[in-house]
Image (cartoon, rainbow, N blue to C red):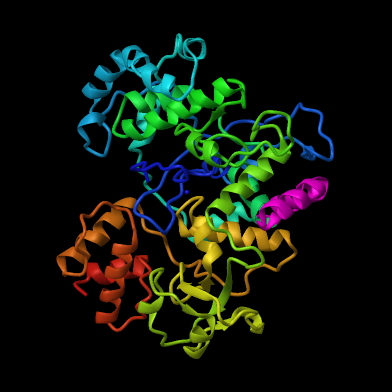
């Protein structure tokens, strides 16, 4: 998409989202952050093979997103313990690991050699490398406020971004035609990923990926994971796919137009323009094809959509609205689910699960197999919903039919923590309260709502918290 920052090859914020501020998304226990950067100028001469990105007037980030740009973070590490309480995240442990950083990096040489990295490359790219301790403040960062799903969609799926995406698709039609034929992945999904991850290569992150991954490989609580990312970044530089000035991205190491982690780059990046380099920064052909290849490897089904906006009838059993409960579209229809706007479902036999991210007062969605594939790019339901909806808008689809419950106030982190504590006190929640609203909290809220005779939609709203505070 953790901040308890639980990072995997997809578990990180889109760089374009980070520029708009922190968000917490439904779909997992964790959320994550990345840092944005200024405009990236594509200097390579583009042809019909490589494609091109139409230029747009420079605008401030606040103007692009319609929100206030968050304050610039301090330039130095705060010197404080991490919020996770992990022993490797104490200030003393961080200082000790930072002092040992040169030795830690040097000790990766045997592993680098086993990956085919030459001694010359290793020395060239690691000599003088220093830790970026500011990252330690991001690893365990926790947001005080979150964004509602509808606010998240408002930020990402804008008229300006839709127009921009259509321009990119039109300018690079030959590339998208060739990639769609080669990989069978919907061009509009690929274009949506590009638009949301980096706002079409204008916000991709400005930190050295090598320095960031080296820091996290030697300092903090995810060293084993990031050692693999660091060595993979070295492989990218040794092979010459990207130059050091291109290999820049988020604090967690995601880079390029569609924000690959180094290990994901190794698995999925392709040299579609056949220039000898897999360039996911400046080559449109490689950007589009590499992203499509990842979706193909993750199981994308050609010719199928991601999901449908649906109307959920009153009195519906919301216990069925769960990612683990799949039924055919025709079975959902027998339960009263109808496609929004009165249109028929084109494939009644498709298996789907029901998602109601805004509760009983908001729209519902039947999510198909390809929605799960999008979640392999970032396992947050709101992210995947934004990608799917943005793709539909790019292809000419209409806005969502039903209204969101915009009058609902989203809980602060302290209130989310209190909600979990009260749910545990009444016997509904069995996890450890942490302020992160995942599937366990959603299920607990459902049980509480059923007990008080409310629609058991699992939506953790301010009104639910008030009922809990009132002793049920």
Query: Looking at the image, is 36 positioned above or below residue 385?
Result: above
User: Quarter of the image holding residue 142?
Assistant: top left
Residue depicted at x 45% and y 54%: 379
> In the shown orientation, is residue 98 left or right of residue 198?
left
User: Quarter of the image holding residue 304?
Assistant: bottom right
Query: Looking at the image, is 43 positioned above or below residue 437?
Result: above
Q: Main secondary structure of the magenta part?
A: helix
Between 119 and 345, which is closer to the camera in this rendering? Answer: 119
Q: How many marks?
A: 0
Residue 251: x and y, percent?
46, 31
Between 194 and 59, which is closer to the camera in this rendering? Answer: 194
Indicate the quadrant containing the C terminus: top left, top right, bottom left or bottom right.
bottom left
Asked if the magenta segment contains residue 439, the reply would be: no
> In the shown orientation, is residue 165 left or right of residue 423?
right
> In the shown orientation, is residue 362 left or right of residue 242?
left
Q: Is residue 345 visible?
A: yes
Between 117 and 241, which is closer to the camera in this rendering? Answer: 117
Query: Looking at the image, is 171 positioned above or below residue 36?
Result: below
Residue 422: x and y, percent?
20, 64
Query: Looking at the image, is 431 positioned above or below residue 55?
Result: below
Residue depicted at x 46% and y 22%: 211
Where are the magenta residues, as a range? 158-187
Residue 296: x and y, percent?
59, 53
Residue depicted at x 27% and y 72%: 467
Q: Is residue 208 visible?
A: no
Residue 265: x and y, percent?
54, 37
Residue depicted at x 58% and y 42%: 16
């Amino acid at each position: 998409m953790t901040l308890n920052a639980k990072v995997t090859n997809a578990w990180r914020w889109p760089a374009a989202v980070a520029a708009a501020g922190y968000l917490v998304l439904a779909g997992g226990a964790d959320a994550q952050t990345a840092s944005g950067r200024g405009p990236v100028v594509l200097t390579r001469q583009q042809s019909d093979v490589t494609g091109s990105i139409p230029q747009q007037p420079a605008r401030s980030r606040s103007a692009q997103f319609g929100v206030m740009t968050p304050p610039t973070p301090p330039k130095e590490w705060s010197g404080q313990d991490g919020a996770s309480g992990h022993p490797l995240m104490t200030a003393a442990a961080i200082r000790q690991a930072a002092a040992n950083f040169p030795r830690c990096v040097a000790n990766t040489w045997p592993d680098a050699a086993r990956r085919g990295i030459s001694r010359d490359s290793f020395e060239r790219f690691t000599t003088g490398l220093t830790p970026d301790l500011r990252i330690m403040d991001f690893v365990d960062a926790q947001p005080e406020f979150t964004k509602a799903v509808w606010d998240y969609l408002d930020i990402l799926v804008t008229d300006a971004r839709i127009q921009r995406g259509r321009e990119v698709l039109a300018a690079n039609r030959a590339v998208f035609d060739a990639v769609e034929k080669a990989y069978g992945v919907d061009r509009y999904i690929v274009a949506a990923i590009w638009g949301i991850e980096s706002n079409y290569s204008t916000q991709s992150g400005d930190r050295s990926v090598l320095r960031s991954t080296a820091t996290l490989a030697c300092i903090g609580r995810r060293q084993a994971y990031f050692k693999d990312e660091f060595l993979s970044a070295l492989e990218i530089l040794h092979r010459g796919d990207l130059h050091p000035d291109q290999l820049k991205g988020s604090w967690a190491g995601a880079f390029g137009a569609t924000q690959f982690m180094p290990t994901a780059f190794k698995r999925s990046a392709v040299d579609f323009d056949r220039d000898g380099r897999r360039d996911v920064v400046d080559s449109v052909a490689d950007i589009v094809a590499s992203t499509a290849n990842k979706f193909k490897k993750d199981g994308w089904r050609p010719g199928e959509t991601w999901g449908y906006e649906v109307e959920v009838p009153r009195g519906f059993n919301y216990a069925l609205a769960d990612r683990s409960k799949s039924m055919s579209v025709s079975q959902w229809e027998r339960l009263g689910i109808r496609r929004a706007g009165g249109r028929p479902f084109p494939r009644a036999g498709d298996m789907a699960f029901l998602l109601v991210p805004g509760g009983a007062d908001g729209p519902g969605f039947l999510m198909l197999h390809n929605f799960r594939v999008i979640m392999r790019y970032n396992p947050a339901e709101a992210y995947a919903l934004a990608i799917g909806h943005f793709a539909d808008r790019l292809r000419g689809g209409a806005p969502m039919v039903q209204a969101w419950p915009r009058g609902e106030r989203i809980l602060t982190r302290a209130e989310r923590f209190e909600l979990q504590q009260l749910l545990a006190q009444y016997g509904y929640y069995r996890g450890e309260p942490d302020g992160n609203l995942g599937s366990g909290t959603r299920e607990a809220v459902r049980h509480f709502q059923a007990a008080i005779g409310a629609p058991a939609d699992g939506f953790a709203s301010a009104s639910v918290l008030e009922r809990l505070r009132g002793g049920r």
